């Protein structure tokens, strides 16, 4: 079972959409979190340690992740999806973009 973590800023639109889209994907366990102090689900070191593969939505997320959780990033691969904060939760265009960009890694 591969542990997948989706990260954005506030965990309200992009990463929860990704979590829902891939929730029933075979052989993966998914979670999502945010890096901002007011995130719905705030990213923790334990979440980072448990992840095999981490998808961040923007380059700034990768930088913040590396800065805050460097000790916990020992074995996880981090992939930047380059998806801007321009979408609503479960917006069809966002779902299609996620499927296109994430599926090759699964």
Image: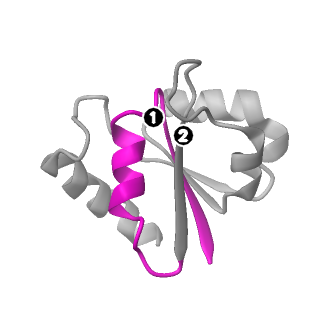
Residue marked by disc 2: 33
The residue at the far right in this view is: 71
Residue 25 magenta: yes
Q: Residue at x 54, y 54 (%)?
A: 31
* Mark 1 secondary-structure assignment: loop
**Does residue 66 sit above or below 98 in this rendering?**
above
Bounds of the magenta span? 1-27
Question: Left or right of 87: which side holds 18?
Answer: right
Q: Residue at x 41, y 74 (%)?
A: 25
* Colour basis: one colour
Q: Report whether residue 103 is seen.
A: yes
Residue 11 magenta: yes
Q: Are marks 2 and 1 in contact (CB under 8 Å)?
A: yes
Which quarter of the image is occupied by the N terminus?
Answer: bottom right
The residue at the far top in this view is: 37
The residue lying toward the viewer, choosing from 50 and 70, is 50
Residue marked by disc 1: 11
* Displayed quadrant of residue 45: top right
**Does residue 95 sit above or below 67 in this rendering?**
below
Instruction: Name the spot of residue 77 as percent of width and height, x first.
Output: 64, 57
Q: CA distance from mark 2 to mark 1?
A: 5 Å
């Amino acid at each position: 079972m591969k542990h997948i973590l989706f990260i954005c800023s506030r965990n309200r639109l992009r990463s929860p959409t990704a979590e829902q889209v891939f929730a029933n994907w075979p052989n993966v366990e998914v979670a999502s979190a945010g890096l901002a102090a007011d995130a719905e689900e705030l990213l923790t070191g334990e979440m980072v340690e448990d992840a095999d593969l981490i998808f961040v939505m923007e380059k700034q997320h990768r930088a913040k992740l590396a800065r805050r959780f460097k000790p916990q990033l020992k074995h996880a691969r981090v992939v930047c999806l380059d998806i801007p904060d321009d979408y609503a939760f479960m917006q069809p265009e966002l779902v299609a973009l996620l499927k296109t960009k994430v599926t090759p890694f699964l």
